[in-house]
Image (cartoon, coloured by chain):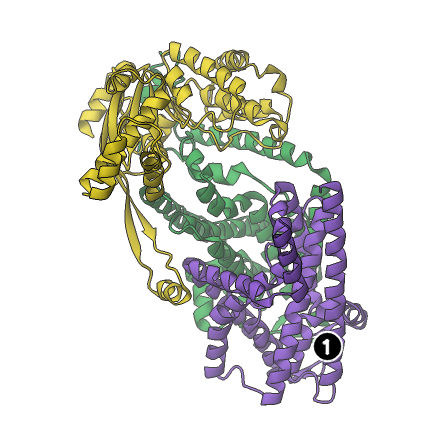
Chain colours: A yellow, B green, C purple
Amino acid sequence: MVTQVSSMALGDKQQLEADPIIVVEELTKIFRVRLDGDGFRERVKLFFKPEYRAVTALDSVSFTVRRGESVGYIGLNGAGKSTTIKLLCGVLVPTSGRVTVAGIEPLRHRKLNARRIGLMMGQRTQLLWDLPVKESFTLLGKIYDLDPQTYRANRDRLVEALGIGSLMETPARMLSLGQRTRCDLALTFLHDPAVVYLDEPTIGLDVFARERIREFLLAEKAREVTIFMASHDLDDLEMVTDRVLLIHQGRILFDGTQGELKAMFGGQLGSLEDTVKRFYREEALAQEEAQGDAHKKARCDEARGCEKTPGCEEAPERREEALR
Amino acid sequence: MNDKRNPHAESTGRTRMNTWLSTPRPSRGLSTVWHYVRLYYWYLRANWLSLMAYPIEFIIVNLSGVAYSLGSVALVWVLFTQVKAIGGWTYPQVLLIYGMSIFSRSLFHLFWVNLMSLSRMVRDGSMDRVLVRPLNPLFQVVADYLDNDDWGELATAIILTWTSLGMLGKRTVWNILWVLVSVISGSLIFASVHIVANAMAFFTVESSGFSWLAWTVDEFTRYPADIYDRVTRTVITWILPVAFASFYPAQLFFENGYLKRTALATPVVAVLTFMVAYRFWSIAVNHYQGAGH
Amino acid sequence: MTHRQTSATAALGRLNIGKYLYYTRAEFMRGLRYRANYWATLCSSVIITIIQWSLWRAVYSNTHSIAGVDLPTMMAYVLMGRVTAGFLAEPANLRIGPRVRSGTIVHDLVKPADLHIQLLFQSLGGALFRLVSTGLPIFLVLLITGALTIPDPKTIALFMVSLAMGYVTLFSTGFVSGVLTFYTKSGVGVEHLYTLVEFLSGLYLPLEFFPGWLRTVADWLPFKAIHYIPMAIWSGLTGPGEVVSSLVSQLIWTAIMVVLCRAIWSGAVRHLTIQGG
C-alpha cells in the first residue's frame, strides 16, 4: 500500500505509459456451486441440507499486456473467459492472485479504474432502450463527467468512425443488432478509455457488420488503446489482435503471437481458426493420454494428422461438454 | 458518497495529460454531492423521456394505482362502518396513521423502486455494468429506473392525510410540515428495509422472496403499532423501525397520544437506519464481488 | 409427421392427465430449488398472519359481535385465509402478451399439449408447494396455540371441495386477465387491479362486512368463489343449511369461468395462427 502511494505520487502519467498496462499474477478463482440433485427424495434432502461443489474457473493464470497491444482471448465455452474479464475489471474478487491495471488494483480503486477502462459485453446493451441513441451518449457523458469539448470531440469522432450519425435520433429498441452493436461500441470508447475489454463484440453479426467493427477496432488500436478481446470469432481475432492467449479449463495453455502459434504446427495450417482447432484437439488427446485411456489413445494415434477422423473430431466437443 | 478507499483521487485530478485518458476532476465533499445531484437530474430526464414513449401505459397504470390504494383503504373504511374504534383509536386517527403509512410508502416507491430489480440485475449481469462505472453503485441502481406507477397512490395518500388532519382539527402549516418531514423520514426507513432485503440478491441468486418480505414489513405501519404484541412492537420500533414511518410521528396530533418525545426522534431514527442499511449494502456488494454468480 | 400428429390429437382427446401431472410435479420440485426464497416467503406469511390476528383482536376489543359475526368465527375465517393464502395466491406467469412478443408462444403452440390445461396443472404445482411449505406450518402453529380449532369432518370435507373449486376460479381469473394482456399490448396495471379482485373475493373482510351496495357488487361477480365461499364454510359463517346452496353457486361460477377461459383462449389461438400475433 505504502509503495503504491509513493509510486502514484509521481503522477499517473508514468504509470499509464509504463509498458505493461495489465499485469495478472497467479490469478485463481474458485466458485461454489449448490448441488441440485435429481429425483424427488434427493431434492427434498438437499432443500434441508444443501451441499456444495467447488468449481475452479481460473487456475493460477498469469500474463501481462503491454500498452497499446491488442490481445485475443480464446477458449471454449465455459473455459473461464468471462470470469477473467470480470476479474480484470474489478467486478470479481479473485480467490488468490493479483490484478494490476495501469499501476492500480481495480478492486481497491474501483472508481478510478472505471474511468480508465471500457467494457463491452456483446450480448448486453448499455443503450437506453426506449430513447433515441443520442440520449445514451448524453447520459454517459455526464456519468463519466466529461467536459463539453472532450465530450463533443469524442462523440463526433466515434459517430463518424462507426457511421452511426443517421441513427442518433432512432430509439435503441428499433435498431438492428448490427446497428446496436456499433452504437454500443461507440459508447464504450466515449470516455477515452486506456484499456478496453470486449466480450464477444461481434456475436450474431453479419459479415459486413463484422468487417466494419474490425476496421474500427484497428483504428482505435492505432490510437494506442489497449484492447483485450474475448471472442469465438477467430477471424475477428486474426484481423485485430497481435497476440493470443489460449485458455482451457481455467489454465493458459498458450501465450504468444499468432505467428508463434501457427509455427507450432509447422505453419502449414492457414487460418487462425484451423490452428486453434488443431491446438485444442491435440490438447484433448494429450489429456486422454494422461488419463491412460488406452483404447481411445490407440484410436486417436491412428487418426493423428487426419482432420476428418470422427474419433478425434468429437474430442473437443466432449471436453466442452465436460467443462459446462 | 466519496470513495474513501481511494487516496489518489485528488492527485489524479491535477495531472491531466493524456489525450486518451479523460481524468477525473478532484471531487470531494460538497462538490461530490453536487455532482450526484446533477447526475440524478440527467438520470431522471432519461427516465421521464422513456416513460413518455408509453403515454397510455402511464395513464392506465396510475389509474389502477388509485384502484389499488382504494382497495387497500377499503378495509379500514368498511371496518369503521361497523365499529367505533380499533384498539382505542378513532376513525380519523386510524385514517391518519394509514394515510401517513401509504404516503411514506408511495414516496419510497417513486424514488427507490428499482431496488426491486436488483435480483434480476445480478442474474443478467447488469450489476457488473454498474460496478465498472465511476459512480456509487447504490446511486446507479436507484437512479437507473423509475416506474412512475405510484402517483395514484401518492394522490390517495395526500387526500387521506389532508382529510384526517381536517377531521382532527389539526390542519395547520406547522403540522403539515411535520407530516412532510415524517413521511420523508418514513420513506427513508422503508428504503433502508428494502435495501437490506434486496441486497440479499448478492448472497443468493433467488432473492425475490426477500423483496416481497420487505413489502410485507411495510404493512405493519398501516395500523396503530400498539395493537401488536410486545415482541412485534419491540421489533418494529427498535430493529426494523418502521413504526416511525407512521405511528410515532402521528402521535403528535393526538390528544391521547403517547411517546410524543419519541415521535420527535423520527428524522434521526431514519438517518441512523439508513446508515446501518448502507453499511449492510456495502458488505453485500463486497460479498458479491467475492463469490460471483 | 402423420404419426406424431395423430398421437397428439389422441393425447388431447383423452386429456392425458398423467402428462399434465408431470407439469405439476416439475413445478412443485422447482419450489424446492429456491431455498432462501422459501424462508423469506414463510416470514412474509407469518408477518401477515400476525398483523391480521392483532388487527382483529383490536377490532373486537370493545364488542362481541360485528355485522353478526363473533370473534371466534372471524378468527377462523381470517386465519384459515392466511393458511390457504399461498394456495390461493395470484398465479404467476399467466401473461400471454409477453410470450407473444418475445416469441416463446411458438414453443407453447407446437407442443402436443393444450397451453390452458398445461398452465392450470403447472400453477397447481406451485400452489401445492406453497400450501405444504408455508400453509401447513402456519396451520400447525395456529392449532397448537389454539388460535384455530378443527371443525367436524363433514365441514372439513366440504371445505376441501370448495377450496379446490376456489383454486380453479382463481386460476381462471388469472388466465383470463393473462390472455387479455395479449390484446392490450402490455400487462401493466394487471397486478394493481388484482388487489380489487382480492378485496371483492373476501380475502381481507368477509362479505358480511360490506355495505349493501358493495355486497351486491360482490355477489354478482365470480371472485367470491375464490375465497369467501371456502372460508365461510370452514369458519361456520355459512350455516349448515346453506352450505349446499353455497357450493352450488360456487360450482356455477367456476363453470362460467372455465367456459370463459376456453372461449377467450381459442379466440386468441385463432388470432395468433391466422394473423401471426
- Whether C119 is drawn above or below B18: the answer is below
Residue drawn at point x = 45 percent, y = 72 percent: B230
Judge whether A244 appears above or below B260 on screen: above
Label 1: element kind:
helix
Point out residue C81 in the picture as x, y percentages from the top left corner.
59, 73
Instruction: In this rendered view, identify the residue nearer to me: A302 or A73.
Output: A302
Position of the N terminus of chain A by quadrant: top left
Q: Which subunit holds the residue at mark 1?
A: C
Residue occupying image coordinates x 70% and y 72% = C225
Q: Judge whether B153 appears above or below C156 on screen.
A: above
Please state which of residues A56 and A303 is positioned toward the viewer in this rendering: A303
Query: Is residue C203 in sight in this rendering?
Result: no
Q: Nearer the viewer, residue C201 or B183?
A: C201
- Residue beneath disc 1: C208
When the figure is inspected, residue C132 is found, relative to residue A234, above or below; the finding is: below
Rendering coords of residue A229 (x, y %): 38, 24
Query: Looking at the figure, which quarter contains the C terminus of chain A?
Result: top left
Which residue sits at x=66%, y=77%? Answer: C162
Q: In the image, is A118 to the left or to the right of A94? A: right
| Amino acid type, callout 1 | Glu
Position in image of residue C202 (x %, y %): 68, 70
